[in-house]
Image: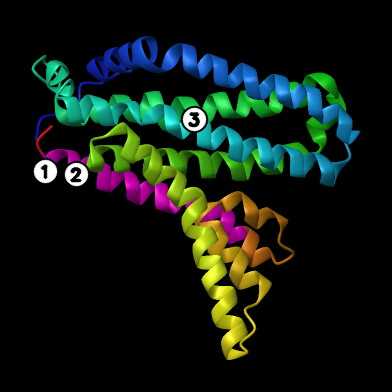
Amino acid sequence: MKRVDWETVLAQTDFIIMSMLGKSLVGLVVLVAVLNAVFLPITGFEPETAKNLEAFFGVTYTLLAALLLTGIADEIGSGQAMIHLVQPITRREYIAAWLLAGPALLGVSYVIALLVPAVVLSPRMITNPAVYEPALYGLGELVYIALITLLASLVLRNKSRAVFAVIAFMFLIPAIVGIMAAIVSEALGVQISDEAMTVFISIFHPVVAMFDNYGSVRAFGLIYPWAASLLLVLIILRYIDLVEV
């Protein structure tokens, strides 16, 4: 197997950022940062209220950021990816560039969008976990969802289908399963614990786990997205080797 040329990867990453993600990503960071700066003072920087707000913006940022990455679906589906791959760049180098331009860069921009407004508006928040805890959980969720988006885009090869798949994973599936679980629980007279439901929802939104009172549930929400992300990277790298683009 040919070694990955990181200069080639970085050059392709720069191309992706400049041609596809650049303006949209900057706009996303500015939008979330401004909204955060507007609404955070309303909370009075009270820890629990601020944590809820940061978690909400984190999920919003994750969804919008993930939708940006579905651009690779059109590249693959339309055959545009072949334009890049006839150049001296391998499939792994091509997908590595998307991993850097996507999950890695989005993760950095996410932290900036959430933390900078909070610290600027209230410097005492630097030592307040109400800011760092949502950012920590949200970062894991962002990277995890971004990788799911890339995999869905590679498999579906169509931006519209990839967008639907991401929205379904983040919102429709947990909602439908939650409703079904409630119906079955009521019909059978079986009580499903709040902790069990939180763990289930955390599969789709790890940030939810930080609101649970049990340390084991919070630990699950912190560790799960990173473990799943590692597995997703391996799957994506394997998949790109096996399919025609």
Question: In what element is the residue under mark 1?
Answer: helix
Residue in the picture at 50% in, 63% down: 176
- Check disc 3 and report the residue beneath it: 65
Q: Look at the image and say whether residue 177 sits in the magenta stretch.
A: no
Can residue 214 be seen by looking at this rendering?
yes
Can residue 226 be seen by looking at this rendering?
no
- Check disc 2 and report the residue beneath it: 239
Q: In the picture provided, is 22 more to the left or to the right than 54? A: left
Disc number lying in front (2 or 3): 3
Foreground: 146 or 235?
146
Q: Look at the image and say whether residue 224 sits in the magenta stretch.
A: yes
Kind of residue at badge 1:
Leu
* CA distance for labels 2 and 3: 23 Å
Kind of residue at badge 2:
Tyr
Number of disc labels: 3
Quadrant assignment for the N terminus: top left
| Residue 97, x across and y down, in percent | 30, 24
Q: Earlier in the sequence, mark 3 or mark 1?
A: 3
Q: Earlier in the sequence, mark 2 or mark 3?
A: 3
* CA distance for labels 3 and 1: 27 Å
- Check disc 1 and report the residue beneath it: 242
Q: In the picture provided, is 91 more to the left or to the right than 51? A: left
Question: In what element is the residue under mark 2?
Answer: helix
Question: In what element is the residue under mark 3?
Answer: helix
* Callout 2 crowding tier (Cα within 10 Å): few <14, some 14–19, many ≥20: some
Q: In the picture provided, is 172 more to the left or to the right than 165? A: right
Quadrant assignment for the C terminus: top left
Residue in the picture at 42% in, 43% down: 166
Q: In the picture provided, is 12 more to the left or to the right than 163? A: left
Q: Which residues are magenta?
A: 219-243
**Magenta stretch secondary structure, dominant:** helix
Kind of residue at badge 3:
Ala
